[in-house]
Image: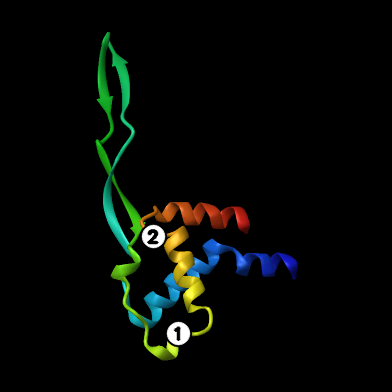
Amino acid sequence: MDSERRLWNDEVVVALRFARNTVHHQLAEALEPRDEPYPLVTTAVRGQSRVVGPPTILDWFWVPIGQLPKPEPRFMDKGYDHGKQAYQDRLEGEPVANALAHLSVLL
């Protein structure tokens, strides 16, 4: 039971629940694609160096809190403010992969 309580009190999980509720109840888009710089790899082929790989890749990021709609009052339960703050602190502007990696460690 302690591990379950720890999971639901984890700030990233709280932020993810806030995002999930916003997407579900307000039909909001909480993710946005971005082209991000990709680490370039150089390789030597017959005495010449060349760049391998694209200069950017498409990645998914959490949108700023201001782009999410405010919920109807009936969806603003006692955990709304905590979830909103957790979203701002832990997810906003960050790659989605970071939250998924965090969850994989928790589970």
- Judging from the image, what secondary structure is the residue with disc 2 in? loop
Q: Find the distance from the CA under tag 2 to the CA under tag 1.
A: 19 Å
Is residue 78 visible from the viewing direction of this image?
yes
Horizontal and vertical percent for residue 42?
A: 31, 22
Q: Relative to 24, is 35 on the left or the right?
A: left
Residue behind mark 1: 76
- Sequence order check: which comes first, mark 2 or mark 1? 1
Furthest-top residue in this view:
47
Task: Pick the residue in front: 72 or 103.
Answer: 72
Residue behind mark 2: 92
Which three-letter amino acid code belongs to the residue tagged 1?
Met
- Judging from the image, what secondary structure is the residue with disc 1 in? loop
Task: Pick the residue in front: 53 or 80.
Answer: 80
Q: In this view, does 58 lie above or below 87?
A: above
Give the quarter of the image for residue 54: top left
Instruction: Name the quarter where the C terminus is drawn.
Output: bottom right
Measuring 29% from the left and 69% from the top, which residue is drawn there?
67
Horizontal and vertical percent for residue 49?
A: 26, 16
Horizontal and vertical percent for residue 74?
A: 43, 91
Furthest-right residue in this view:
1
Measuring 43% from the left and 59% from the top, which residue is drawn there?
91
Residue count near mark 2 (Cα–Cα under 10 Å), binned few <14, some 14–19, many ≥20: many
Colouring mode (rainbow / by chain / secondary structure / one colour): rainbow
Q: Relative to 20, is 65 on the left or the right?
A: left
Is residue 30 visible from the viewing direction of this image?
no
Measuring 34% from the left and 81% from the top, which residue is drawn there?
26
Which three-letter amino acid code belongs to the residue tagged 2?
Glu
